[in-house]
Image: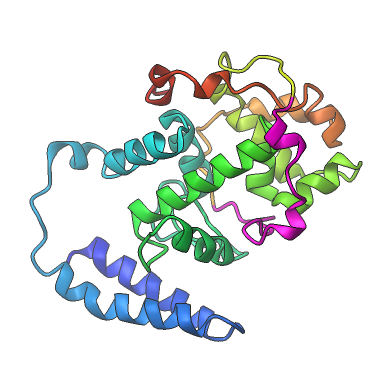
Amino acid sequence: MTLRAAKMRAAGRRFLGRMRVRPGTLLFAAGMAIFCHGLTGADAQPAPVSRQSTDDPYAAHIAEASHRFRIPERWIRAIMRLESARDPVAVSRKGAVGLMQVMPATWAELRLRHHLGHNPFDPRDNILAGTAYLRELYDRYGSPGFLAAYNAGPARYEASLMGRLLPAETRSYVARLRPFWDGGDGPGALTAAQRNAVPWTVAPLFTNRSGSTATADRSLGEGASADMQASSRAGDLFSAGPRSRELFSSPDVWTSEP
């Protein structure tokens, strides 16, 4: 068994142990146990490593997620670096897991909806789940609000629209990611889907992720947080409101890199 597989198996067992003590998670825990038991055999004879996977072991997964959910690859890479520093077994102090730092309750919903595997630390499934969540948040809140909702949670973001301060961590998070949507979005009205969206409180997928960001790659967007220092409230921070979806309309943009 490779070192990487061993680390993922250990992370899965730790995750399983935490899930066992939470009400309503025994079925999910059982699935994790089955997966972890079979992981050694599955990795006993690893497949040959391609040049692409050596250069970037997540490239194929990112490309698949980008195509499937129409999110630019550069956005996925940027969020992955900022959320987990590309560590597939990262676990935040709030319990968010994997490359895209997906909360367990959110993972459970997305896993069923998109027919993913049982292990939230699996790079492919974690990237797909995180990207699917980004897409749903974007459709609901537009840009850049979806980034704040991904970091702080939909409840916290919607409270900020009513005047409650966003956490400094979230303001910095959005500022660091700002260069990665620069040039793609223009002013635009909310779509009908956004205007008629049901409140987050009746959508079980949207769970609070406040504080879920793992240790970030500080080279990402270094210095950009200064852009947010003058604004504390969401009304100021996102004064332009949700933006148009022009960024997601061109296949050339989906696969562009930073």
From which residue to which does the magenta span run? 190-214
Image position of 202 (left or right of 107): right
The scheme the figure's colours follow is: rainbow
Q: Residue 203: within the magenta?
A: yes
Q: Residue 90: within the magenta?
A: no
Which quarter of the picture shows residue 29? bottom left
Name the residue furthest right.
163
Residue at (39%, 62%) from the top-left corner?
121
Which quarter of the picture shows residue 22? bottom right
Residue 250 in the image: above or below residue 10: above
Q: Position of residue 139 (x, y in %)?
A: 62, 37
Q: Nearer the viewer, residue 63 or 100?
A: 63
Residue at (80%, 44%) from the top-left corner?
166
Residue 236 in the image: above or below residue 108: above
Residue at (68%, 23%) from the top-left corner?
243
Image position of 57 (left or right of 255): left
Residue at (56%, 18%) from the top-left corner?
246
Which quadrant holds the N terminus?
bottom left
Q: Position of residue 192 (x, y in %)?
A: 71, 31
| Residue 185 seen from this side | yes
Q: Main secondary structure of the magenta part?
A: loop
Q: Position of residue 62 (x, y in %)?
A: 36, 39
Residue 247 in the image: above or below residue 60: above
| Residue 173 seen from this side | no
